[in-house]
């Protein structure tokens, strides 16, 4: 069984930066995309970004140009560098893994989530 563990959330002022990290354990995620989704209070879960096993990267339009996702297959980790944060980015961020691109909203594995709060 795969476990995903996030770290790096917190409180930041608008315009600031945070870096989220996620480490997978239990097995190597060969063939799986790893990435991030988020859910704000009262809102639907939202895809943020993903990177496939072969390194193809996808972003939601809302974060393009501000967020950067990276992956280390050897270490079974994925990271999300978030810059120019806005209050709309406030949400619980989940590390996820799925076969395919990771954009479908259907995930095979989830982390417990880490809170990101952006104060205006």
Image: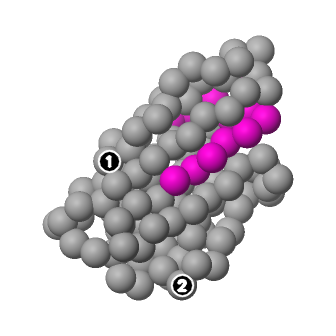
Q: Is residue 88 magenta?
A: yes
Q: Residue at x 58, y 78 (%)?
A: 55
Q: How many marks?
A: 2
List x then y, in percent, for residue 94: 46, 47
Residue 47 vs residue 84, the one in the foreground: 84
Give the CA distance from mark 1 to mark 2: 22 Å
Residue 77: image quadrant is: bottom left
Would you name the residue on which mark 1 appears?
A: 5
Whether the residues at callouts 1 and 2 have beta carbons within 8 Å, the answer is no
Secondary structure at badge 1 equals strand
Q: Is residue 43 magenta?
A: no
> 44 above or below 70?
above
Is residue 99 in view?
no
* Residues rendered magenta in the picture: 79-92
Q: Please, which colouring scheme is shown?
A: one colour
* Residue situated furthest top in the rendering: 120
> 16 above or below 21?
above
Residue 54: mark in rendering: 2
């Amino acid at each position: 069984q795969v476990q995903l563990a996030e770290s790096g959330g917190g409180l930041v002022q608008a315009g600031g930066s945070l870096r989220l990290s996620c480490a997978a354990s239990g097995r190597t995620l060969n063939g799986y995309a790893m990435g991030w989704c988020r859910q704000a209070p009262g809102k639907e879960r939202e895809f943020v970004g993903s990177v496939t096993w072969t390194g193809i990267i996808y972003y939601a339009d809302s974060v393009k140009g501000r967020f950067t996702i990276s992956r280390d297959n050897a270490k079974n980790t994925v990271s999300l560098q978030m810059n120019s944060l806005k209050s709309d980015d406030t949400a619980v961020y989940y590390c996820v893994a799925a076969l395919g691109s990771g954009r479908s909203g259907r995930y095979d594995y989830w982390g417990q989530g880490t809170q990101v709060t952006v104060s205006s």
